Structure formats: structure tokens, C-alpha cells
Image: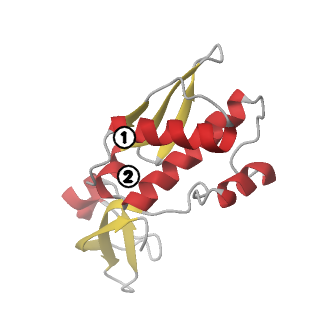
């Protein structure tokens, strides 16, 4: 892990939001080890109160510093839009333009974390998963390509850059 702790990330987010959006950050930036399918999220309560910006444990553990800060900028842009009453979401042209302007990644464009690699025993096709159960018991799983058995062939760690 890089030396980017919650205090540093919160300070970075405050500076980013004030400089680029003239918005004050009133919520913390925290680590959430339960996030599995996203690298971060901006959390709002049911009554519309901003609660926090969460970054996944995977991105903080395995991500390159530039990737971590890019994900944080992405979530900060969600926060800034929310504070300004703009409800564009991921994929909307205005939001995507803001991401490009601030060199923040679009959703689902980065691969970060530890992946288990497996191979189809029939055709040799290689796949990857983050599901630990596949590593622990590969005989319980079949390949997507041939519906044949798989064999584990190793692990690969992605930092979001490669």
C-alpha cells in the first residue's frame, strides 16, 4: 500500500473540491474493505444528507498512487455535482467530460486487486476471477467457454495501470 491514509486523502479531496468546484468538503474519506465490485462510492443517506466518500480496500492496498487519487477525484466530482444540484451520473456526457477534464477514471475502466487465474482443461482458454472460493475449490467450477473443468494456474495483481 502507498502511504495514502484517510487523513491525507481527505485533505487531498478538500483541496481538489475547493480549487476546481469552489465546494467545501464536509464529509470524511474512509476505507471500506467490503466494497468488491466498485473502487469507490459517494454515500448519501435516505433523506439526502451526504455521509462519506468510501474507497475500497482493494484500491488502497493494490492501486498505484495515481490510480487511488484518480478514483478519489471521481468520487469528489460526484460530491461536487450533488452539492450543486446536478444529478448527472456515470455515463452522462456532462459527468464524463468532468472526469476527462480532471484525469479521473470512468466507472469500470480500471482493473485493481488480486485475481486468481485459471485455465480450461479442454481448450486451454485462460480466465481470471477475484472469487476466493474458486482458488480454494476449483473442481467445483466449470469454464465459461466449454463448460469443462478448470485448473488453477496462478495469481496476478493489478495496480490499475497495467
Q: Which residue is mark 1?
A: 8
Q: Quadrant of the N terminus?
A: bottom left
Viewer-closest of 12 and 68: 12
Q: Secondary structure at mark 1?
A: helix
Q: Secondary structure at mark 2?
A: helix
Q: Is residue 125 left or right of residue 149?
A: right
Between the residue at mark 2 and the residue at mark 1, the CA separation in whole angstroms equals 15 Å
Q: Which residue is mark 2?
A: 59
Task: Give the image location of residue 138, x and y in percent.
Answer: 25, 63
Residue, x 43% and y 70% (percent of image)? 161
Coloration mode: secondary structure
Viewer-closest of 121 and 66: 66
Residue, x 75% and y 30% (percent of image)? 84
Residue, x 56% and y 62% (percent of image)? 109
Task: Give the image location of residue 95, x and y in percent.
Answer: 73, 49
Q: Quadrant of the C terminus?
A: bottom left
Residue, x 29% and y 52% (percent of image)? 61
Task: Give the image location of residue 44, x and y in percent.
Answer: 58, 24
Amino acid at each position: 500500500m502507498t502511504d495514502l491514509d484517510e487523513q491525507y486523502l481527505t485533505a487531498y479531496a478538500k483541496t481538489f473540491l475547493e480549487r476546481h468546484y469552489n465546494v467545501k468538503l464536509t464529509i470524511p474519506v474512509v476505507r471500506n474493505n467490503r466494497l468488491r465490485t466498485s473502487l469507490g462510492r459517494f454515500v448519501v443517506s435516505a433523506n439526502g444528507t451526504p455521509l462519506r466518500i468510501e474507497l475500497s480496500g482493494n484500491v488502497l492496498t493494490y492501486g498505484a498512487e495515481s490510480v487511488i487519487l484518480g478514483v478519489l477525484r471521481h468520487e469528489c466530482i460526484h460530491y461536487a455535482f450533488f452539492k450543486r444540484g446536478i444529478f448527472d451520473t456515470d455515463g452522462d456526457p456532462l459527468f464524463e467530460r468532468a472526469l476527462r477534464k480532471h484525469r479521473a477514471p470512468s466507472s469500470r475502466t480500471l482493473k485493481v486487486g488480486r485475481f486468481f487465474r485459471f485455465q480450461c482443461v479442454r481448450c486451454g482458454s485462460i480466465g481470471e476471477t477475484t472469487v476466493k472460493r474458486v482458488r480454494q475449490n476449483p473442481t467445483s467450477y466449470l469454464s465459461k467457454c466449454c463448460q469443462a473443468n478448470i485448473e488453477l494456474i496462478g495469481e496476478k495483481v493489478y495496480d490499475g495501470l497495467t
